[in-house]
Image: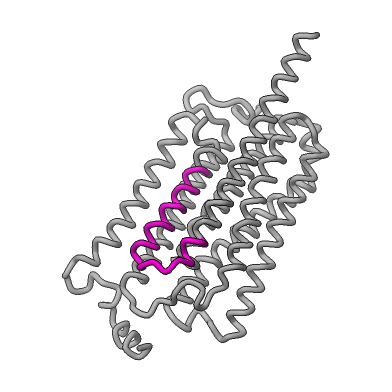
Amino acid sequence: MNEAASQLTEHEAEVRRTARAHVTTGVIIGMIALAAVYVSSLDLPLAQRAAAILFLAFTQGFIILWHTMHLKKELSPARRLIGVTMLLVAFLFALTIWTYGDPLEGSKYTDAPGVVEDVEEER
Amino acid sequence: MEIPYTTEPRADTGLYNAKMGIWLFIASEIMLFGGLLSGYVFMRMGLPGWPAPGEVLDVPLATLNTLILITSSITMVMSWTSLKVDDFRKFRNYLVATIILGVVFLVVKSVEYNDKLGHEYYPSTSNFFAIYYVLTGVHFLHIVAGIVVMLYHLATGGRIWKRNAAQFTNRIEVTGLYWHLVDLVWIFLFPSLYLI
């Protein structure tokens, strides 16, 4: 009886520890969001601003995925599933950025019919 | 016949059915938003005259919404941990708090939409507004869906909790994973649209 009671208390203590960890994680994510807003307000060149803000966003994303969504504790199938998906999305991003270094006609968004005229009109 | 692995994990995957399902769903959602964000990068890099941060969008309002969503993620986790220690009353309170925070997010977003539409910024106004309305609109719908699911749990939770507490706890965990995903998506939309 005593053993069962102590096990329950241990379980409760573990759950409370988890809850505290989640609150701390939430506060850290909030602070990083505010830091990103601060960086955005600085007078930085676009490339530097984008790099700094994206670094902060990816840090937040990693913390949410790894700790809040417990991916850290999951076994390999879930990790592999998310890992491969993110790799494919990263590939899509890389491809998008890479095509802007590609001189082939039609590879740029502005090559689409009508877009150049619209852009010039906006100017 | 009883459906296997509704509460206990399968030995080979280490996951129960619903959790396997939600991870698959999350993977598909990453593809959806990854594609949309890739479209954003595509247009952003190819077009001159992109608005500077804070030029047309309200950064303080969006920052407030970010903090609201992060707080709702915390209350969602707290509702799940309350069930883990068999405190159904606390679970309800935390779930109600999560729903309220979700609704507040939607209200703030609606205020922002209303302001933009009032200034005649429509999806057809420019490429920036087209991608802004698509990205935030799809995310808005995800928040609505999450709130509907949580309201369902709030309405039927008591009955299911009495019948099978472990299964209900798992349902809340899975709902929580979806809610964290919605938070995760916003964590990337906010800097992409408002801060860069």
Q: Range of the magenta residues? A: A37-63
Above-or-below relation of B128 to B183: below
Relative to residue B158, is residue B29 drawn left or right? left
Above-or-below relation of B80 to B140: above
Residue B44's x, y, as percent?
A: 37, 70
Residue B159's x, y, as percent?
A: 81, 38
Front residue of B70/B18: it is B70
Q: Is residue A73 magenta?
A: no
Judged from this view, the residue extending furthest toward the left is: A103
Relative to residue B99, is residue B61 drawn left or right? left
Q: Is residue A41 magenta?
A: yes
> In the figure, residue B90 lies in which quadrant?
top right
Which is the main secondary structure of the residues drawn in magenta? helix
Q: Residue at x 74, y 34 (%)?
A: B83
Front residue of B73/B131: it is B73
Front residue of B159/B74: it is B74
